[in-house]
Image (cartoon, rainbow, N blue to C red):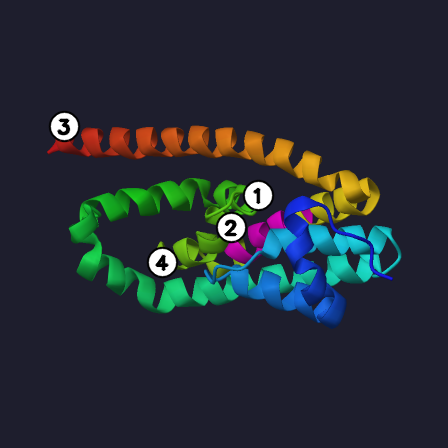
């Protein structure tokens, strides 16, 4: 008998109950190259199931890790093969000029490893970080290393918390998500300030 899933996880019960590990792998995989899918949510739900003995927590963690790394690498290939041309052709319509794009590239080249690692924990960035890394030309081996680190930390955190917290994971998830939002806003402000500073310096040099 499957354990009841708390709050926002409840709608995933039929999917997990029917497909089990396949559901975890597939949903995490497609989320990580931009498809809107509840990857983090299904990982947490699978951890709750594992805590109740319905799934094996080691298998959940290994499958989620592999799916996360593979999914982000698909995103990287998408960005690497077509992202740059897309930005140069259409970016000016959203004020992303080639000059600003170069500044963003420099920022990502210098701090890309940290961004790729942290992005795993931030909604929106988790789905797009592979595409951004590919578009900005981040070396693949560097991306792979930091992406794997972020995936390991992300899977380890949520799988472990869900496994031990069980029915209380809903409250814990709400609290962590609230602080994630503050961290994301602060990161966005810092990134914008850095890019603006670089642009001003270049303008003064010209």
Mark 1 or mark 4: whose residue is earlier in sequence: 1
Q: CA distance from mark 3 to mark 2?
A: 35 Å
Q: Position of residue 28 (x, y in %)?
A: 60, 61
Q: Residue at x 70, y 50 (%)?
A: 44
Dot 3 or dot 2, earlier in sequence: 2
| Residue mark closest to the camera, 3 vs 4 | 4
The Cα–Cα distance between marks 3 and 4, rounded to whole angstroms, is 28 Å
Say what secondary structure mark 2 lies in: helix
User: Residue 167's x, y, as percent?
Assistant: 78, 43
Q: Is residue 148 visible?
A: no
Disc 2: which residue: 126
Mark 1 vs mark 3, CA separation in Å: 37 Å
| Label annotation for residue 135 | 4
In percent of width and height, residue 103 lies at: 28, 42
Circles 3 and 4: CB distance less than 8 Å? Answer: no
Q: CA distance from mark 4 to mark 2?
A: 15 Å
Residues at badges 2 and 1 in contact (C-beta under 8 Å)?
Answer: yes
Can residue 180 be seen in this snapshot? yes
Please state the horizontal and vertical placement of residue 67, each as a whole percent of the image.
63, 64
In the rendered structure, which segment of residues is drawn in magenta? 143-153
The secondary element bearing badge 3 is classed as helix
For label 2, the crowd category at 10 Å Cα-Cα, with few meaning under 14, some 14 to 19 and many 20 or more, is many
In this view, the residue in front, 170 or 127, is 170
Identify residue for label 3: 204
Disc 1 marks which residue?
Answer: 121
- Label located before the other in sequence (3 or 4): 4
């Amino acid at each position: 008998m499957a354990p009841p899933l708390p709050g926002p996880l409840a709608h995933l019960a039929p999917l997990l109950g029917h497909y089990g590990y396949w559901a975890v792998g597939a949903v995490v995989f497609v989320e990580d190259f931009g498809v809107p899918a509840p990857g983090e949510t299904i990982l947490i739900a699978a951890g709750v199931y594992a805590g109740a003995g319905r799934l094996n927590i080691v298998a959940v963690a290994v499958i989620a890790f592999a799916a996360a790394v593979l999914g982000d690498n698909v995103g990287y290939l998408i960005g690497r093969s077509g992202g740059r041309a897309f930005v140069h052709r259409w970016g000016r319509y959203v004020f992303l000029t080639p000059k600003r794009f170069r500044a963003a590239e420099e920022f990502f080249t210098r701090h890309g490893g940290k961004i790729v690692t942290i992005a795993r924990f931030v909604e929106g960035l988790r789905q797009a970080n592979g595409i951004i890394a590919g578009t900005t030309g981040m070396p693949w081996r560097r991306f792979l290393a930091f992406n794997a680190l972020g995936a390991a930390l992300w899977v380890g955190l949520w799988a472990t918390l869900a496994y031990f917290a069980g029915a209380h994971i809903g409250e814990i998830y709400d609290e962590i998500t609230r602080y994630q939002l503050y961290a994301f806003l602060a990161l966005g402000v810092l990134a914008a300030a850095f890019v603006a500073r670089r642009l001003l310096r270049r303008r003064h040099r010209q």
